[in-house]
Image (cartoon, rainbow, N blue to C red):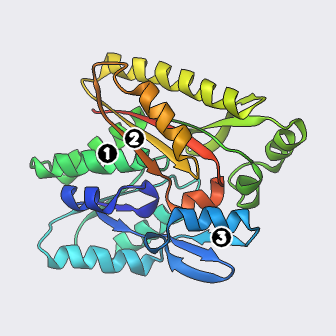
Amino acid sequence: MVTDSTSSLAPAVANRAGVVIIPLNVIIDGQSRLETEVDPRVVAAALGDGRRVTTSRPSPQAFTVTYGRLANAGYEAVVSVHLSAKISGTCEAAETAAQGAPLPVTVVDSGSLGMVTGFAALSGASCAGAGGAADEVAATVRSRAELSTIYFCVDNLEYLRRSGRIKAGVALIGSVLSVKPLLTIAEGEIRPYERVRTSSRALARLEELSLAALAQAADRSSAVDIALHHLDGRDAAERLAAALSGRVRTAAEVMVCEVSAVLGAHVGPGTVGVVIAPRP
C-alpha cells in the first residue's frame, strides 16, 4: 500500500500498517525540502513571518523508485492512494510512473486530503494483510474515502487564494466581511460550506457539524474513526476531540494530529479540521 505525505499519517502508524509514504515538497524562500523532513510548525512560523512558502508534487521518478523497490521486495501488485487530483498533480505523477512499473499498480484518487486519504490507506493495508487481491484493496480504499466527511475552518482564506486552491472571489468576500469560513471537500475540490462571524462561533459550528456527521456515520458502520487536524491550533483541536470522544458507541479512534507541512502551507496557521471516517 502506497500513499503520500499529505495523508498526515504518522510514520510509526504507517510502518506498522505496511503503508509506504511518498513525500511531497515544501519550498520556503526558494529552498526545497521533502515534506517528511519539515515540521508543520516551521511552515506556520514562516507564513506568520511573511516568508514565501510554496509546494510541489513528487516527481514521477519518486514513484518509479518506490514501485520498483516494492517489486524487488516480492510484492505482486501495488495500490497507490493519493490526495485529490483536483488539488494536486500527485495522482498524475503516480499514474505516469505506474505505466512503466515492473508490477501492476492501481492509482486511486481519494477525492479528498489529510486523514481521509490516511484512513483509506490504512483500510487498504488491512484488506491486503487479510489476503485481499489488488482490486479488492482498491475497492476498499475508494469506499472508505467516499464514506468519509471532512470539515475545516481557516483563520484566513488568503493562503488558499494564493495557492489557487479556492476562487479569488470567495477569498475576497471572506476578507471584506471579516468572516470565518467553514470549508469542506466536494467533488474533489475545496469549497465553502458556511460563513460565521467569529472564531469561537466557527469552532462551535464545526463541533455541531462533526457531531451530526458522526451520528450519521455511526448509523451505517460498526466503527468510525475521527481525526482532528490543526496547524498551530492544538488547543482548539483537543477541545473538539474531547467533545466528540465517547459521543457514539461506534467511535473507534479519535486522534489529534497536525496537518502535513504541505497542507499547512495552503490553509495557514489557526486552521482546525475534522475528519469523520466510517469503516467499510
Residue occupied by mark 1: 141
Drawn side of residue 128 relative to residue 251, left or right: left
- Amino acid marked by disc 3: Thr
Gap between marks 3 and 2 measured at Cα: 26 Å
Q: In percent of the image, x 28 and y 19: which residue is there?
A: 249
216 up-or-down from 84: above or below: above
* Label 1 crowd bin: few (<14), some (14–19), many (20+), radius 10 Å: many
Residue occupied by mark 2: 145
Q: In percent of the image, x 41 and y 36: which residue is there?
A: 146
Judged from the image, the secondary structure of the residue bearing numbered disc 2 is: helix
Judged from the image, the secondary structure of the residue bearing numbered disc 3 is: strand
Label ID, residue 54: 3
Mark 3 near mark 2, Cβ–Cβ under 8 Å?
no
Circle count: 3
Residue 58 lies, in percent from the top left, at: 48, 73
215 up-or-down from 1: above or below: above
- Amino acid marked by disc 2: Ala
Residue 271 lies, in percent from the top left, at: 61, 46
Residue 208, image quadrant: top right
Residue nearest the observer in this picture, 174 or 58: 174
Q: Residue furthest right?
A: 176
